[in-house]
Amino acid sequence: MPHEDHHKIPESGFRLSMVVALNLVITVAEVIGGLLSNSLSLISDAVHNFSDGLAAIIAWIAMRLNQRPADQHYTFGYKRAEVIAASINAGTLAAISVYLCIEAVNRLLHPHPITGSIMAWVALIGLIANIVGTGLLYRGSKKNTNLYALYLHLLSDALSSLGVVIGGIAISYFNITWIDPVLTILIGLYILKESIAILKREMDMFMLAVPSRLSMDDIRKAILSVRGVDGLHHVHLWEVDEGDIHLEAHIKVRDKTVKETDKIRRLIEETLNTHFNILHVILQVECLDTPCETEDRL
């Protein structure tokens, strides 16, 4: 996925605002429709759509904050604001999805009458709106990781709404009322799975974990393969926010001039950038025979 194109932010901001508006309309419509039809799956689908509205807001905030320069207090800038917001969002959604699943089990044990026609028509509105939303984000999703993630969420929303439409039709024509709580459980479990995945990813960022898509062993081999590097230790790799990866390390070289060590440093930076998309590299160069107090560390 290519890096964010800052020239596209005004256009992306407009498209994101349209997506937020669509998701809020869907949420309100599905909550009202769910209450009128007594459909729990419609309400769970509303929660699903509301979550994507929040995700769109977070993506917009992230794009704006990423443009703000670092200052004397926040030397990394404001990139972690998205991590905090995403964690709060995911935690809230996880709690709601658990509640919906519990309610769905109660509905299975104690069935309620459901108006399938209202359920199907309202879900159809959600389906159409999600298709429009994916269309709005399609172009921007090719150039921005945040928009691409949101684009995939809207696609999953469309599939969820389609399932509720089919469920409403089944209830209207065949009176299969158990399909409503079953759909609720499936949607709730999907939201829970996605929420846990988001929480894990954000917690990894907070704990300065190595990005899951990268291998420390591969990075070590790549650095040691650079001609002139005779040793490597004190390696740290972390992610400030999505795609902003930093690496620091101590490298051992034989006695060389400043010009020669600078060439080695630039070769390492080029290698890490080309093969691992690591743009921020901090290297401490040490002579091969000089002991280092951190040499027994990673």
Image: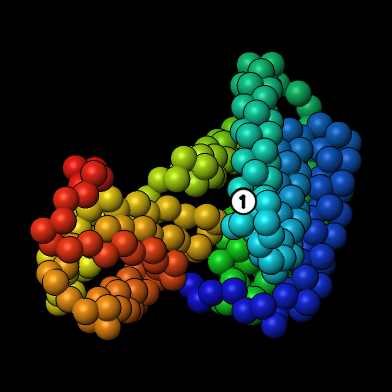
Percent of width and height locating residue 224: 17, 66
**Residue 296: percent from the left, percent from the top?**
19, 42
Task: Please state if 298 lies on the left or on the right of 134 as rendered.
Answer: left
Q: Check the image and tell me how it is coloured.
A: rainbow
Residue found 61% across the figure and 63% down from its top: 146
Q: Position of residue 131 (x, y in %)?
A: 70, 67
Q: From what the image shows, is residue 75 above or below residue 189?
A: below
Query: Mark 1 is on which residue type?
Result: Arg
Image position of 237 (left or right of 141): left
**In percent of the image, x 17 and y 76: which residue is there?**
256
Q: Compared with residue 256, is residue 37 higher up or lower down, i.e. above or below?
A: above
Q: Residue at x 45, y 61 (%)?
A: 245
Disc 1 target residue: 80
* Residue 185 appears left or right of 270: right
Residue 31 seen from this side: yes
Q: Classify mark 1: helix, strand or loop.
A: helix
Above/below status of 220 relative to 6: above
User: Which sits in the foreground, 40 or 116?
Assistant: 40
Residue 27: x percent and y percent?
A: 81, 47
Q: Quadrant of residue 259?
A: bottom left
Number of callouts: 1
Q: Answer whether residue 187 is visible to the viewer in this image.
A: no
Badge 1 density bin: few <14, some 14–19, many ≥20, Cα 10 Å: many
Q: Residue at x 44, y 70 (%)?
A: 279
Of residues 59 and 190, the one nearer the viewer is 59
Of residues 100 and 267, which is closer to you in this image? 267
